Image: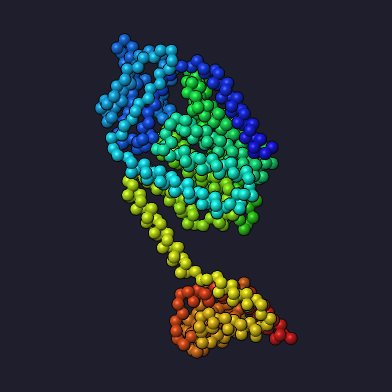
Amino acid sequence: MDIKKRMGIYTLIFLTILSFLTYLSKDSDNYIKISNNRESIDFFNKNQEEIFLYKNEDKNLEKIKLDSYLDGYASFNTKGKNYILEVQEKKFLTEKYHLKKEKEPIELFLNYLPKSNLRQNNIFLNSLTVIFLIYNFMLFYNFKKEILSKKELFFPIFFVCLKIILTNTTVFSNIFLIRLNALVSSILGLYLLLYVKSIKDELKDDFVLNIGLWILFLMYYLGEVIVVSSILNIKILNYLVVNYLYFLKIVIFFYIWIDALIIILIMFFLSSLKIKKKQIIKEIEKKNLIMIGSFIVLSLIVELFINNSKYFYYLNMFEFVFIFWYIFLTNINTIGKIDILTLKIFQMFLHIYLFFIITENVWLSLGIIFSFLTLNMCTHFIKGTLRVDKYYIENLVNRMYLTKNYKEFKEQLSKELKKNLELIDVETKILIKREDYKKFLVDRNYDESEILLEKGDILNKKYDYAVRLKYSKNPFLALILIENKNIKLVYEEKRYLEEISEKISLVASRYRIEKLQEELN
């Protein structure tokens, strides 16, 4: 069964349970809901506002517990008629409301007015979100060929972008969009989970593992269905609090700690364990296991902040985006298209978000972004200066492979090096015996990394440099002797010669074997 049909079945089950719970809870009106726009207007809660609810019966005040719910608070299973709501700031009373409950539930909206100017913070946060979205669009464009070949990826890409947009509560603040954000997270998580299950062939034949994963999936799905239903309809949540409180606590535990992303990472971890460890990938798999294990730990740490929207909104969004790209890259096997700078930029966004949320300092955050970009630009240019143009290397190597004999090899190599490096003379010596190097170089122990040798090691003082060609276990296959009138080679020229020596060693080895056969004949 393909993913679309499975998604259809699970969506139908969810809608059936949602309809059933809506019917059961239609008369569940004994709750108080308090909404405000604080987290939308003042994401950082500069006013340090606190809300308290008291039941007022016969002039006796009894404090009522308030639970966080969407954009405000809620109290469930309320039995009194008269209530007092107090808004305090830094322990001082700023607002007071007298509430009277009839048959209908009490739903109160508090118009929150921040005292500080938050425009600068909101502009920075919104701009950062837009730039991060553009960054993901650039990655999508980079992989457009692979994405177009896998149509099943269109669906999660749309929801990943929607998740990034809806994360920013300073723009999308009403209850409908908050509920939409929760629904998007559930749909995206379920789809990614089903997608990973369909591509992990290593786990399909293991009966015990599949039973364990099915148990985890049922716990996850139950948590998602019940909690998302409660988010969409507060009457359902009140009904469950009144009638099935312990069941609700278990379901919330499932929702928090056994989510889709955790199960996906566990599947990757188990899949990595199941792969037969050939020697060539043994070390890579060890690092992969450690990496996935660290992702699982970090994903669990994110859940600790579920009641603190200041951190959870953005951590959860980064978690989804990162898992999506991890699934995508491991599936299409084009990890080579992602360079270190791309990964660093992703990390930069996460660190800047967290740094800004903690410090609330726009200019300091901008300074860190500027220093990051400047340092990475410098690193990029430094790496560019240390890298030799591949054109010159490949052009010379191709000409060497086209040579027909040792004489032509020597002449062509001399011609190319003289032309590219403006040298006076180049002489190539094939060494039949390993000890033959002593005819040209000082007899000493040469380190494996010593490819380019200078005048002090050369017996014939006519030459300024000697390039050692080595192949397999033979450290002295051939020597390239270079005369340059005592003019020092610069770093790039030395790197060029070192890379050339590595590339043409195989050709030199072929001509050494031919010379050896000639001598034997």
Residue 281 x %, y %:
61, 56
Residue 99 visible in rendering? yes
What residue sits 45% from the left and 39% below the top? 167
Does 287 appear above or below 17? below
Q: Is residue 337 left or right of residue 406?
A: left
Q: Nearer the viewer, residue 39 or 482?
A: 39
The colour mode here is rainbow
Q: Which part of the image, by quadrant, shows the N terminus? A: top right
Q: Is residue 225 left or right of residue 310?
A: right
Q: Nearer the viewer, residue 333 or 361?
A: 361
Extreme residue in the top direction: 58
Quarter of image, res 86: top left
Does 471 appear above or below 98? below
Residue 37 x %, y %:
37, 31
What residue sits 44% from the left and 66% below the top? 382
What residue sits 37% from the left and 44% below the top? 123
Q: Which part of the image, by quadrant, shows the C terminus? A: bottom right
Residue 81 x %, y %:
38, 13
Q: Is residue 297 left or right of residue 39?
A: right
